[in-house]
Amino acid sequence: MDTHALRTRFGLSQDRMADWLGVPRSSLALAERGYQAPTATTGVQELRLTLAVQGLVYDGTGGSFPTPPALPEPPPDLAELGYRLRQCQAKIQGLELQLVKLQQRAAPYVARLAATPALRAYPGLVDDAEDEAAWLTIFELEARRQLREHCGATARLLLEARLAGLQREAELLAEIVEASATP
C-alpha cells in the first residue's frame, strides 16, 4: 500500500503520517505526488503499517509474525447516551403537544368541510343566491387552503413521522442504556 492509501485506511492527515514516518510533511506530500522517493526509514515505517493492515508484525529482519489481538473499542459513553435519551424524551413531549395543537387548529376547517355540503344543499330561498354561493366557495376554499398548507393531513403526517422517529430513537437508546447498566 502507498502512503496515501495507508493514510486513508487509518484516517491520518499528512502531518500525522509524516510524524510517523519521521519526515517533513512537505516531503511526504512530494512523495505521494511521485516527485520524491521515500527514504529507507519511511520504507520501514510504511512497511510496518502495511503489514499491520494484513494482521502481521514486521520482525525487523525481513520477516513477520501474526499480530497480537486488536485493542478493544472503548465502551459506549452511558452519560452521553442518557443525555441524548433525555433530549429525545423532551422533544417527544414537545412534538406531542404540537400534534394536539395542530389537530385543534385543523378542527374548525374540518368542520367547515363537513358543513359545506349541508349549507349548499339548503333547498330554501336565500336573499342573494350569488352572494351566498360566493361566500360558501370562500368558506370552503379557505378551509382547504389552511388544511393543505398549514394544519391538515400533510402537516399532521410529517409531524407524526418526526414523532415516530424520535420515539424509536428513544426506545433504542433506553434499551442500550438499560443493557449497559445491567451487569
Image: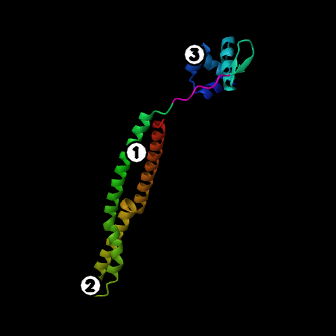
Quarter of image, res 19: top right
The span from disc 1 to disc 3 (Cα, nearest Å) is: 42 Å
Q: Is residue 91 left or right of residue 182?
A: left
Q: Which residue is mark 1?
A: 88
Residue type (three-letter) at the residue carrying disc 1: Cys
10 Å neighbourhood of mark 2: few (<14), some, or many (≥20)?
A: few
Residue type (three-letter) at the residue carrying disc 2: Val
10 Å neighbourhood of mark 1: few (<14), some, or many (≥20)?
A: many
Q: Which residue is mark 3?
A: 19
Q: Which mark is residue 45?
A: none
Q: Nearest the camera: 60 or 42?
A: 60
Q: Earlier in the sequence, mark 1 or mark 2?
A: 1
Residue 33 visible in rendering: no
Quarter of image, res 69: top right
Region of the chain picked out in magenta, as a range: 67-74
Where residue 109 appears, as percent x and y from the top left, is 33, 67
Q: Which mark is residue 126?
A: 2
Which color scheme does this rendered protein use? rainbow
Q: Secondary structure at mark 1?
A: helix
Q: Against 157, is 46 above or below?
A: above
Q: Earlier in the sequence, mark 2 or mark 3?
A: 3
Q: Nearest the camera: 181 or 44?
A: 181
Residue type (three-letter) at the residue carrying disc 3: Asp
Q: Secondary structure at mark 2?
A: loop
User: Would you say residue 167 sits in the magenta stretch?
Assistant: no
Residue at x 43% of width, y 60% of height: 154
